[in-house]
Image (cartoon, grey):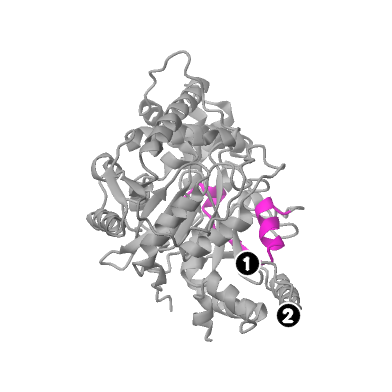
Amino acid sequence: MSDAELGFLSIADASDQIAKKTLSPVELTEALFRRAEALDPKLNAYLLKDADKALSSAKVAEAAIQAGRKLGPLHGIPFGLKDIVDTAGLRTTCHSKILENNVPQRDATVATKLKASGAILMGKLSTHEFALGGPAFDLPWPPARNPWNTNHHPGGSSSGSGSAVAAGLLPMAIGTDTGGSVRNPASCCGIVGMKATYGRVSRAGVFPLSYSLDHIGPMTRTVIDNALMLQAIAGSDQRDPASAKAAVPDFSINIEAGVRGLRVGYLRHFHEVDTPAHPEMAAALDEAVGILRKEGAEVKDVSFFPLSELAAANRIILLSEAYSIHRKWLSERPGDYAKATRDRILPGAFMGAADYVDALRRRAIYREQFKRLLTEVDVVICASSMDPACRIDDEAEVSRTYGRQARTPFNILGVPALAVPTGFSKEGLPLSMQVVGRSFDEATVYRVARAYERVTNWTTQRPNVL
Amino acid sequence: MPDFPEDLKNANALDPSLIERARADATRLVGGMPKEFEPADEPAHIYLADLAS
């Protein structure tokens, strides 16, 4: 197989070939590093590659598999981590001058779990500074770019994760999501990104942005691969005070069951009334819902609180908590942050204690109402981004489109939300939607997304990066 | 809403319009969230993840 073919091999297919011993983890790891050497200078997805350690881990995996000790579907599969995820002995910068030389002593739980599943850590990936700032050109490293058009923004804040997976540099990567930061790059880069239920994946060892809104999530090119990755990282963890004790089901067991008989709510006022979407994004959503109906789902329109109100509550909580985290550094070293990051965090200095408590009270109301809504339907479909990715160097457009999205509600609600590609704009940039489910019912979300993926070919499209 | 926080004097020196922009953003966000509550409306129990179900 060519490096490009290996680069775009799904986890499921690579795992199958590794099990049959027709593909070696060492061969796969080497091919992906060659692709990164050739392509990453245009993408800036990596902040740090760890080739020596990765190749040595790949050799260990290969020997174990040859000896008949294959651990599971991720054994021998390369992955990357957003650079706010701690890695023992490996620099973890949060893409910031503030932590330029930070070398953690311990792995984050999510890194430990992926390594324990036999996956191969390739390196650390670009992020918006501290998972918030936005694409910035005044940091020690350049921002990641979109493989579908390198003049465009890859979304964020898990920008390197989105870019690397979409470009076939990695089959899977970890992102984090506080106001949409897994689902935004997934949407901009045409891949699949899951924000699972709050508490489903441990946050231990991941640099916090907002304690009560932070989620860690898998980013992959296909729905099945996403379920496989979530399976490896989900579960209770004593290191995380918010970790849920809920049992972890097999996320793939019913993934091919289709949508016949499932009740799908179409939450269209988000993108039709509250924040009117780009026409191509809206048309792709209608078409996706039509496909689910044709596949046998019972579709009906549903409504919820206005997007602007939900976004405001998310921002008040997020910025209050983020300012508490960054106050000392912002006071002592403000010039070491990117301008965009200072701009984004500082409103948190002007939120009052009562404003924060009010936002948490609204949050309880929203949760109760959404729970009620999900007794009427099994999943909800809605927009993710309202626009295709804009140019990365157009500061005004980055700023204008930043809030034009429907992801923040689901951080407040804590329910699982999956970004799934729905096609391409006339300019060749990815379009997307979200599938949202009940708390701890990621399996149904995957089932609906897979039913859609199976009859479309969006997740098999490849960017022409060269 | 807090007045000018002393913590931000260095940041303000870097960019004299920063504080005003931040204050305006905060005002807009707080103004965008409804605040009609019953006294019994408690905050979400944010660190009890299982309660989200």
Q: Marks 2 and 1: CB-CB under 8 Å?
A: no
Read off the residue under disc 2: A66
Tell me the quadrant of the picture where the C terminus of chain A can be found: bottom left
Q: For the point 41% across and 35% down, which residue is it?
A: A370
Query: Which type of secondary structure does the marked residue at label 1 adopt?
Result: loop
Determine if marks 2 and 1 fall on one subunit. Answer: yes
Q: For the point 66% across and 72% down, which residue is it?
A: A76
Residue placed farthest to the bottom in the image?
Answer: A1
Determine whether, in the image, residue A105 is placed left or right of residue A110.
Answer: right
Determine whether, in the image, residue A218 is placed left or right of residue A187.
Answer: right
Amino acid type, residue under disc 1 in the picture: Leu
Circle 1 packing at 10 Å, graded few (<14), some (14-19), many (20+), is many
| Mark 2 → mark 1, Cα distance in angstroms | 15 Å
Would residue A17 be seen by someone viewing this image from the given angle?
yes
Amino acid type, residue under disc 2 in the picture: Gln
Read off the residue under disc 1: A74
Q: For the point 55% across and 37% down, which residue is it?
A: A322
Location of residue A9 in the rendering, given as x and y in whole percent from the top left corner = 51, 75
Q: Is residue A183 above or below residue A38?
A: above
Query: Which type of secondary structure does the marked residue at label 2 adopt?
Result: helix
Residue placed farthest to the top in the image?
Answer: B39
Image mark 2: chain: A
Would residue A312 be seen by someone viewing this image from the given angle?
no
* Nearer to me, A158 or A26: A26
Q: Is residue A396 above or below residue A10?
A: above
Which range of residues does the magenta coloring cover? A107-134
Q: Is residue A405 above or below residue A70?
A: above
Location of residue A16 in the rendering, given as x and y in whole percent from the top left corner = 58, 75
